[in-house]
Image (cartoon, coloured by chain):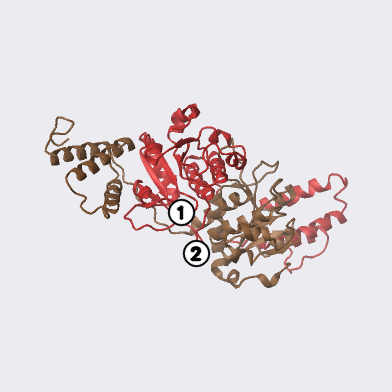
Chain colours: A red, B brown
Amino acid sequence: VANPSAIPQMIEDPAHAAAPAIILVEPQLGENIGSTARAMLNCGLLDLRLVRPRDGWPNPAAIAMASGATAVLDAVRVYDDLASAAADLHRLYATTARHRDMVKHEVTPRHLAEEIHSYAAQGARSGILFGRERTGLENDEVAACHAVVVVPLNPAFTSLNLAQAVLLITYEWYQAQAQAPPRVLTTSDSYPALQADHQAFLDRLERSLEGHGYFRTPDLRPAIWRKIVNLLNRADLTEGDIRILHGMLSAFEGRHGPRSSSED
Amino acid sequence: VANPSAIPQMIEDPAHAAAPAIILVEPQLGENIGSTARAMLNCGLLDLRLVRPRDGWPNPAAIAMASGATAVLDAVRVYDDLASAAADLHRLYATTARHRDMVKHEVTPRHLAEEIHSYAAQGARSGILFGRERTGLENDEVAACHAVVVVPLNPAFTSLNLAQAVLLITYEWYQAQAQAPPRVLTTSDSYPALQADHQAFLDRLERSLEGHGYFRTPDLRPAIWRKIVNLLNRADLTEGDIRILHGMLSAFEGRHGPRSSSED
């Protein structure tokens, strides 16, 4: 450990002890270390370990790219070899883009997240290894891990930079413990309105309201009109809704709508 | 449409018609347009639309940052306003980091992905709006959308750059249609071995094999040892496994193990 005094108290906290460590093996560019720190803090991770960073540590280029993620950079620990970096961990995962000639478990980032949380519930801490920007992890380093993480992506274009790979994997870890409420999807047998038809109704409504002297105070008009646009969008209008609204507007204007039915 | 001739045939393909369009509203940096194209192609998306890009289009800085995602950049369409960019879409989603003083549905990227696929099954296409790097989307632009997408992140540090936000949201869209096989998590009532204990056994095994003349061909030794390290890691060894392995090794060496029990 090059700077043991930098180990933050929060790493000792039981909540953080359950979070995985991110281990960059021989990272080449300080910029990528900084972007990695930013992605980690986005996802509530604080434990960043570097094995033989090419340009040493600390690295000013990392600080410039971290966008304020100093809580991570200040706590970075540097190691001479992977075994030292991983000694206090129980589970190791290797990230790799190319297929290796090895018999190995492969997990998706989502299932990795579940696995890390599951082991953490038993008190076992995990580390996730990321290799060199150009060449990735060596076969011996992959062999030293319990499983390999592969991000499912467009098979024709799987190129991710280091910080993007860290972001996707730590994002999944955060989602697995976040309790963000999903939106309830309301289904309908009608068809969503086409934007062009929706906008045509809005244009007609605005002209009609203007013709009827609805907008009395010019200063308030933009805010009031925005509220009307917004409430109509919250309604998730269908094709049928647009026809009904046109019919209603025709009725208010004292003439028949475009169709024969009085309520259409 | 500034360059209608650039509309690729693949957009007309039913499979791609189900994919959302990505709409960047007044993007400032060409680098971010390039990174966005890269993230989109990673996730199998091809339909990128720009509303009033600050530095015009095409933009050499975008090409430099796209890392070969030319299928997306070649098909970019540029518009003078959001309404034109969205006219052929049915559903619009706004991405925003800060809370707005609006009554609005909020969805997570994961549920957005499910919603987009659900609407696509009815033939309705979606567009996802991303705002200016510095100031995001304007309130009128958010009002024009059916819902807002909020990425659940560490509330103390939610800062994402444009391409990272695109990556997380398009990643979720790809996952919702990818059939990547998850790993089955095998549970056990034993405790995973600590790396330090695991490594100590490996070191003892290697010395013991060497002492017994196991490594006969020096050239083959690294590959054979790697296979041994790898197979032992595939076994997901527990604390108890390590004790058993030490006991087995002691038996082969013709002496008792560190514990009293003969099989320990």
Give me the residue at 81% from left, 57% from top: A252
Q: Is B2 located above or below residue B153 in the figure?
A: below
Could you say whether the residue bearing mark 2 is in a helix, strand or loop?
loop
Residue B232 in the image: state x and y as whole percent.
27, 46
Residue at 74% over, 64% down: A262
Q: Are marks 2 and 1 on the same chain?
A: yes
Residue that label 2 marks: A156
Between residue B243 and residue B154, name the one nearer to us. Answer: B243
Relative horizontal placement of residue A87, taking residue B68 as reference (left or right): left
Label 2 vs label 1, nearer the camera: 1
Quote the CA–CA distance across marks 2 and 1.
Answer: 19 Å
| B261 or B80: nearer the viewer | B261
* Mark linked to residue A135: 1
For this view, does A87 lie left or right of residue A38? Answer: left
Q: Provide residue B195's location: percent of width, then percent of height.
A: 33, 38
Pick the front one: B232 or B168 = B232
Observer able to see residue A188: no
**Residue A190 image position (x, y, % from top left):** 60, 61
Amino acid type indicated by mark 1: Thr
**Outermost residue, front direction?**
B218
Quadrant including the N terminus of chain B: bottom right
Task: Tell me, for residue B171, which label it has, or none.
Answer: none
Chain letter behind tag 2: A
Q: Give SS at disc 1.
A: loop
Amino acid under disc 2: Ala
Label 2 environment density (alpha carbons within 10 Å; few <14, some 14–19, many ≥20): few
